[in-house]
Image: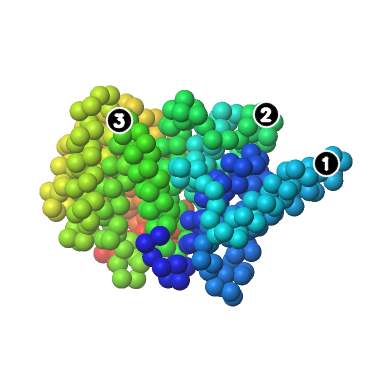
Amino acid sequence: MIEQLSDVPIERLLRELRPQALGTVVRKFHDFAAAEDAVQEASLAAAVQWPRDGIPKNPRAWLTAVAFRRMADHIRRESARRRRESEVAIAAALDAAHATESTGVEITPQEDDTLALLFMCCHPALTPASAIALTLRAVGGLTTAEIARAFLVPEATMAQRISRAKQSIKNSGIPFQLPTTEDRARRLRSVLHVLYLIFNEGYTSSAGPDLRRDDLSHEAMRLTRIVHQLQPDDTEVAGLFALMLLTDARRPARCGAGGELIPLAQQNRALWDKRQIDEGIALISATLPKGSVGPYQLQAAIAAVHDEAARAEDTDWPQILALYELLRRLSDNPMVRLNHAIAAAMVHGATKGLELLDSLKSDARLSNHHRLDAVRAHLLELAGDRESAVRSYRAAAGKTGSLPERNYLLAQAARLSSEL
């Protein structure tokens, strides 16, 4: 870690360490559900003891050792319940815990345990949607409600999906273990989708008092960089990493002094991270000519066009609209269609954008999402219909769980109301 451990909030440290410890425990015992419970119990113990006693010299080893002991307890209980001996497994768990705790060094695989856990969660017994949900929970540390919002489904539906995913792995009889090289290739697209969703939740939090959750977006970028290093010739891996670099580069200008949301058009572009922009543009420029173009590459290209504009009014909207036209052909995603409507409005006028928005009313994935009302409000304002814009801003504010977004939307409604 770059920062001194004493300077890192314990909650943030545990968020970083939990997936790493879980990857180690799952790798050793091949029981995801039990390992997740063990690491959760170890995290609770750390949350109580570390503020009181101080953070251990090797907090990851401490967390893993405690989780190993919890696994030993679990095996002992299962042994008693099933009336069969498991002394060898219990001894192995206790020996591992003792060795880890006494030496301060745990035996780890050559690759990052969190990344290994990512691939393990994309289990062949699961559908892609279930694998992504499980990984977001285990690796990203997102709550069930946050995952549900990312998938645009009710929280109860997502809770059932995650529960079924765990049960499917257990019933399949397929070991929950490190995937082979061939397995990794098959699971890569699901892994990229997970990293994309984790980054998005970190860049714009779906709920809570803060606009961003930098721990999530930074972890997604760290893992994506590792995947890119392992798969340097995969153009969609490169595209996703470029997209993250180009989007995250705007982070310093997205919030005001009080944490309030600042929209893209009003941001101080001098605050954008030029180093990240240069890295992202170089990466996507080298990737696009290599072969077939995928959704992540197109999104990265759109982000690059935004980042290359010195001022908002210099943005090349015709080029962005053309890129969204290509993206729509590749992805049946309502958010893509929503952003395409914005680009169309910037090129052909607000009326055209509003016409495109009307086609999204019947899409159940987006009909109750605050962004649909927020975009409609913005376009109605551009079209000069301020009364309708006020109603849409207020409707959007009532649907978002993000306090900064809600405050921004209500402020826009109040501004327009005062001008009527």
Name the residue: 23% across, 27% down: 290
Say the numbered circle drawn on residue 202. none
Question: Which amino acid, by three-letter code, is at mark 1?
Answer: Glu
Visual colour scheme: rainbow
**Circle nearer the viewer, 3 or 1:** 1
Indicate the quadrant where residue 30 lies.
top right
Using the image as rendered, state which of residue 219 and residue 151 is in the foreground: 219
Using the image as rendered, state which of residue 183 and residue 199 is in the foreground: 183
Question: Which amino acid, by three-letter code, is at mark 2?
Answer: Gly
Name the residue: 73% across, 43% down: 89
Q: Could you tell me which secondary element the residue under label 2 belongs to?
A: loop
Badge 1 crowding class, 10 Å Cα cut-off, few under 14, some 14 to 19, many 20 or more, is few
Residue corresponding to mark 1: 85
Say the numbered circle drawn on residue 233. 3
Question: Which amino acid, by three-letter code, is at mark 3?
Answer: Asp
Name the residue: 60% across, 29% down: 125
Residue 202 falls left or right of residue 273: right
Using the image as rendered, state which of residue 236 and residue 303 is in the foreground: 236
Q: Could you tell me which secondary element the residue under label 3 belongs to?
A: loop
Among the two numbered marks 2 and 3 on one chain, the one whose residue lies closer to the N terminus: 2
